[in-house]
Amino acid sequence: DKAAQLFVVDLIAAEPVARQPTADPEGAAHPVPTEDGRAVRYVRGVGPNEIAQEIATIDLAVTEPGTGEVVVRPGGSVEALTAHSTGLLLLSVSTTDPTDYTARTCGLFHWDAGNGRLARLTDADTVDIDAAAGPPVVLGDQVLVAVQHRGPVELRSVPTTADNTPLAAETTTHPFAT
């Protein structure tokens, strides 16, 4: 059993050949291309338990497989990545303790490529995003996420400028959800 890695295939070439840019011992997942398309940001495990993860970037022009450069360590597991004009949006469970199952919620975070700051957009106590429903979707200055709310999963919009914002019961679902 080998850890999952990323592969690049030039589909325009006369003879398409798969190249492997990553060789991360704990694997690579959730690739998101940079805006210029020359590199990819991805999630990789840290250590044998893979509870802690980090986001790395690797140039797609590399000729030998390698490990990417770390851009952010969110302090937990990363469930999904989405590109954003100022960096990345990620769904993450903020814990690295494999025995801590009490009230763990999956939140929406924004990593700013300009200043390297990682900020939680949703409240840790009242918002639990259902990462299995898919990655965050950017629509202008809003991010659509699937939130578990008293049983059902609802599509909610979160402002990209939010800061630990609770999604109160009176918050309406996004118009696209109706």
Image (cartoon, helix red, strand yellow):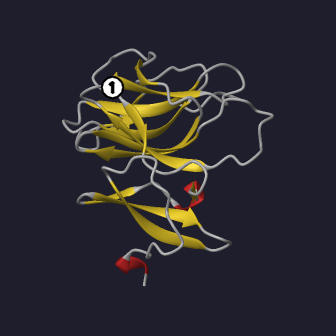
Viewer-proximal residue among 114 and 38: 114
Q: Is residue 21 toward the left or the right of residue 29 in the image? A: left
Q: Is residue 82 toward the left or the right of residue 86 in the image? A: right
The part of the image, by quadrant, that contains residue 177 is bottom left
Q: With respect to residue 105, does 24 lie above or below? A: above
Quadrant in which the N terminus appears: top right
Q: Position of residue 156 (x, y in %)?
A: 44, 67
Q: What residue is rendered at 56% in x and 29% in y?
A: 75
| Residue extending farthest right | 99
Q: Is residue 17 toward the left or the right of residue 120 in the image? A: left
Which amino acid type is shown beneath numbered disc 1? Gly
What residue sits right under mark 1 in the picture?
A: 116
Q: What residue is rendered at 27% in x and 23% in y?
A: 61
- State whether residue 6 appears in this view: no
Badge 1 marks a residue whose secondary structure is loop
Viewer-proximal residue among 55 and 33: 55
Q: Position of residue 7 (x, y in %)?
A: 43, 33
Q: Position of residue 13 (x, y in %)?
A: 24, 38
Question: Mark 1, residues whose alpha carbon is within 10 Å: few (<14), some, or many (≥20)?
Answer: few
Q: Position of residue 167 (x, y in %)?
A: 49, 63
The part of the image, by quadrant, that contains residue 50 is top right
- State whether residue 147 appears in this view: yes
Quadrant in which the C terminus appears: bottom left
Q: With respect to residue 22, does 88 lie above or below? A: below
